Image: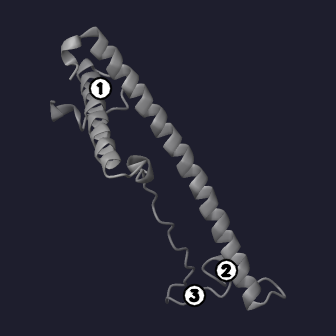
Amino acid sequence: MCKNEQCSNWLNRPLRPSQIHYGLTDGWVLMQIAASIEKKAAKAGKDNVIDSNIKALTYTEPKPKTDKKDKKGKKDPESKAENPEEEKKEGESEEGKRKRLALQKVMELRKKVEDLEAKKEAIVTQIQEVKTAIAQIEDSDPSLKQ
């Protein structure tokens, strides 16, 4: 497999025939590796090894701190807290604040799980599309089957 296409611009359309060939070959190789891993995992009595190890393939920049400081490095008295949600609500106890923040975190994490599940479904769909493309190529040229 020629690695020249690995770092080419995959956003340009239409893709060159060499890019299509590389993509299909790469997908086919990945499917062979996945099948091998699944087979070895099944022999070891483990199920869904690949699914359980799928991770999000996105990178997000950390949020920049918006510390309001004057020229001498002193904090602006108007900027009370780093995160306004962490401020105690009027009449709220410390325990109430902790519970509120914990609930917010749980809700954020649930949303993250939903997003990851959607990404997982998209990846599974892409894998099925690649399998179909591989099958079509192998059907057109039986010498490619292993």
Residue depicted at 26% across the width and 32% down the height: 26
Q: Residue furthest top?
A: 140
From the viewer's perspective, tell me whether residue 124 is left or right of residue 141: right
Residue 69 picture quarter: bottom right
Residue 24 bears which disc, if any?
1
Task: Identify which residue, 90 or 20, lies in the foreground.
Answer: 20
Measured along the vertical axis of the image, is residue 135 above or below residue 70? Answer: above
Residue 86 bears which disc, if any?
2
Task: Identify which residue, 135 or 103, lies in the foreground.
Answer: 135
Q: Residues within 10 Å of mark 3 (few under 14, many from 20)?
A: few
The residue that mark 3 highlights is 75
Q: How many marks?
A: 3
- Residue 87 appears in the picture as rendered: no
Q: Residue furthest right?
A: 91
Residue depicted at 63% across the width and 63% down the height: 108
Sequence-wise first label, 1 or 2: 1
**Mark 2 against mark 3, which lies toward the viewer?**
2
Task: Identify which residue, 35 or 21, lies in the foreground.
Answer: 35
Measured along the vertical axis of the image, is residue 13 above or below residue 102? Answer: above
Q: Residues within 10 Å of mark 2 (few under 14, many from 20)?
A: few
Q: CA distance from mark 2 to mark 3?
A: 17 Å
From the viewer's perspective, tell me whether residue 139 is left or right of residue 52: left
